[in-house]
Amino acid sequence: MNTPGTPLPAPPAEPSRDLYLRAFQGLLLARALDDKLASLYRGGKISGGLYLGRGQEALSAAIGILLQPGDVFAPLIRDLAGRLAFGETVLEVLQTYLGSPLGPMRGRDGNVHRGRPRAGLLPMVSHLGAMVSVVNGILFARAMKGIPGSIGVASLGDGATSTGASHEGLNQAAVERLPLVAVVANNQYAYSTPVARQYACASLVDRAVGYGFQGTRVDGTDLMACLRALGGAFHRARQGGGPQMVVGDLLRLCGHGEHDDGAYMDLRLREAPFGQDCLKQSEAFLRQSAWATAQEIEEWRNRQIQAVEEALNLVQHDPPVDPYREAWQALSTGPGDIHGE
């Protein structure tokens, strides 16, 4: 692993049209699935909470699509786009939310703790900074075993950066020079607490140097900018440049959860650059750059909506949960280990 100040290889190439289009398709799919989940929640079909990623898809999708096999990703409650880009399927998502016994959670749990640990997709313990140390542990173990080349991403919200777990984990990653990339979705509110009541620095990226991270601030509504910023951070971490912090300025375009109307949010934030809808911004970029026509975009949108509807139709025919026939053992053991997790 390189020591501070060691020159790194040339930065990665500019994001290609193909990469951008694949990431944009992920935005469309995540939004279509979020919209369907919101409809199911309002219809009383989902038990537990529902936390949408509306407005945060560009930053999240860029994470998932840039990660490689062998990397580790600890997503949070609004990282549906990143999960899908990193390999989670629409079917698995719907099976989890609708409590299907055929899904990854087998109907045992709520809907935020799902994951595929062996594939590097970690189940969320908590969204309050707890996942940083979990990713650190995996990266440290790989270093001890001499397994090179992989990186770990821990998603954080602006509120999570105020927690003790976050500070301890980030400090540990810097001291051990782990290939961690902490991606902070600064969506302006920790539930209902505005950022003005959370930190006094000009930007959360100012904290990076204090920890010993290299920091990058990016417009989280700009998909191309997210691909550039995260691509650079991933490259530096992978090549021995030490831990990285990427702070994306954006706004969640909904309440904290579907149970929350977000009435406390300052409507003037919608007029700020970070208050724009990343999906609309991406559509405009595609048309302006002549990478796609309005008709093509609409066809892609309809295709993703259809994919969600087809998966939902399958899940709605799954058998109900039967606790009397359930093999009550760890999901990672026994013949019922569906996903090898």
Image (cartoon, grey):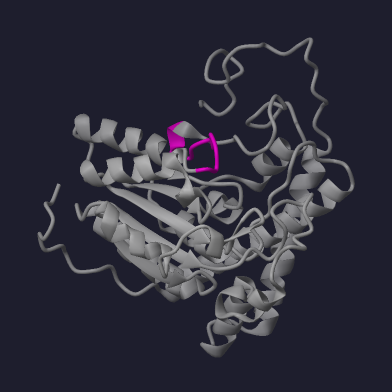
Residue 120, magenta (yes or no): yes
Q: What are the residue bounds of the magenta stretch?
A: 118-128
Whether 43 is drawn above or below 184: the answer is above
Residue drawn at the location 78% of the way across and 15% of the way down: 323
User: In this rendering, does residue 281 appear at all?
Assistant: yes
* Residue occupying the far right of the picture: 43
- Seen in the picture, residue 64 relative to 117 is either above or below; the reply is below
Query: Which of the two residues, 224 or 166, is positioned nearer the viewer here?
Result: 166
Counting from the top left corner in percent of width and height, residue 173 is at 29, 43
| Along the viewing direction, whichever of 268 and 85 lies nearer the viewer | 268
| Residue located at (60% from left, 12% from top) | 329
> In the figure, 233 relative to 337: above or below?
below
Left or right, 157 with reference to 233 = right
Question: Could you say where residue 314 lies in the image, as x and y percent from the top left?
Answer: 78, 41
Question: What residue is at 52 percent from the left and 20 percent from the top?
Answer: 332
- Return the x and y of residue 317 as percentages of the image width and height: 83, 35
The residue shown at (40%, 65%) is 201
Quarter of the rendering containing residue 320:
top right
Question: In which quarter of the view is residue 236 placed?
Answer: bottom left
Q: Say which of 46 and 191 sits in front.
A: 191
